[in-house]
Amino acid sequence: MQQDNIYYYLLLAFTPYIGPISFASLTQRFGNAKEVFKASSDELRPCLERPDQALDALLKKEATKTVEESLTWFEKNENCRLMTLLDEDYPLVLAEGIAPPPVLFLRGKSELLQQKMIAIVGSRHATVQGTKIATSFAKDLASQSWTVVSGFADGIDSAAHRGALNETASTIAILGTGIDRVYPAKNRDLAHEMAQKGLLLSEFPLGTAPLAVNFPRRNRLIAALGRATVVIEATEKSGSLITARLAGEMGRDVMAVPGSILNLQASGCHKLIRDGAILVTCAQDILSEYEKINSKQIQKKTFRQTQINTIATDDSKNKSFRQTSIDTDANDLSSTVQSSEQTPHHETLDLNQQKQEDAHRTALLSAMGFDAIHPDDLAQQLLWHPADIYATLLDLELDGMIMTTSGGRYQRIR
């Protein structure tokens, strides 16, 4: 984005009473953030969730200071970044089930957001045993290429971060404060270490205090990023159960570690299990859930590759099966042009585009088979950009060819 455009983008995103839903509505209506500030009150009002407060803040450009502070923070601090919805590496999973935050403050390894992620959450008042379990789970998962996501709170969250931090896939902390604040204060050393080896992430402007209202917002990001949410020790009124509920509503897997019936910190986990959460007692239980799926997909991929190789061998007169299709299309188009020179050029382009889209749909359906599969696995199989995967999945879902299932997976139904 050009400097002028990023300024207005941030100005709109940080304006009080403009949440992710209003931001999306405004930018869709007016095309970009800069045009929003040229619009009249009557044009803006229908796009706002809280029009009376938001209109006044927009007209006064109340977020000017926040924007300037954010840009200064980004320019003067190493290993820091302002990520926007327009960035190619913005995590697409944040658009599944929630209104994605327009801006993310990042400190550390932003590439971790492109990895397979699992959320681990639990009580702030964890027992010694619960802390050991969280550390062990996180260490084993991160060593097997699963990035661990948690909320940086005391207890289970901090134990999970520490367990994963020195492993291959590391860990991501979703903060309920501005990224320039450390809460709880006792985690200051952990925060500095995560800025080097992991990732700190916040959607809140700089200086935001640890207000109670911020943490449910933080929890929805934890639930959205994780392919599954694992709860280790939680009472029945714990915020961790809110994260688990959000994960379930988004179609993610929910897992819980059981404990003693005499331990109140395990009561929330037992409730989750009664309600259908997957019972897990070690990291391998979690890994096995996804190894089963991956094993099936590898078998289908091998079978599909064998079919492609057979076609390529039989069609030795051409370089590849795909080239044969292209040549055939070209001949068909050539014949059409010769028979009618009045065929508009844009119709030919539309035909080629439609054939390309049909080929994408066919390839994706073939890779899916009829078992539930996660978009990340499809991207690895087909070597496509995740954005292309999600776009084609949406197209197929609208046509009733596939459906969403648990854990953010998709399943072919026709």
Image: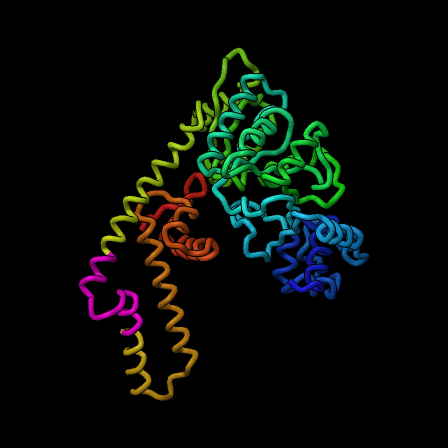
Please tell me which residue lies in front, 178 or 261.
Answer: 178
Q: Position of residue 286 (x, y in %)?
A: 42, 31
Looking at the image, the residue that sits furthest to the left is: 314
Check the image and report above or below for 328 versus 282: below
On screen, residue 297 versus residue 379, left or right, reads: left
Chosen colour scheme: rainbow
On screen, residue 310 versus residue 214, left or right, reads: left
Q: Is residue 237 visible?
A: yes
Q: Position of residue 56 (x, y in %)?
A: 79, 54
Residue at image position (28%, 78%) is 331
Q: Position of residue 185 (x, y in %)?
A: 72, 29
Residue at image position (23%, 55%) is 307
Reply yes or no: does residue 98 show up in magenta. Answer: no
Check the image and report above or below for 173 versus 24: above
Check the image and report above or below for 182 versus 7: above
On screen, residue 14 versus residue 27, left or right, reads: right
Reply yes or no: does residue 325 show up in magenta. Answer: yes
Q: Main secondary structure of the magenta part?
A: helix
Residue at image position (63%, 42%) is 201
Residue bounds of the magenta highlight? 308-327
Task: State how many labels appear.
Answer: 0
Q: Is residue 241 visible?
A: no
Residue at image position (47%, 33%) is 141
Q: Position of residue 147 (x, y in %)?
A: 51, 38
* Quarter of the image that includes the N terminus: bottom right
Write down the quadrant of residue 33 in the picture: bottom right
Please tell me which residue lies in front, 290 or 56.
Answer: 290
Check the image and report above or below for 340 versus 127: below
Write down the quadrant of residue 285 in the picture: top left
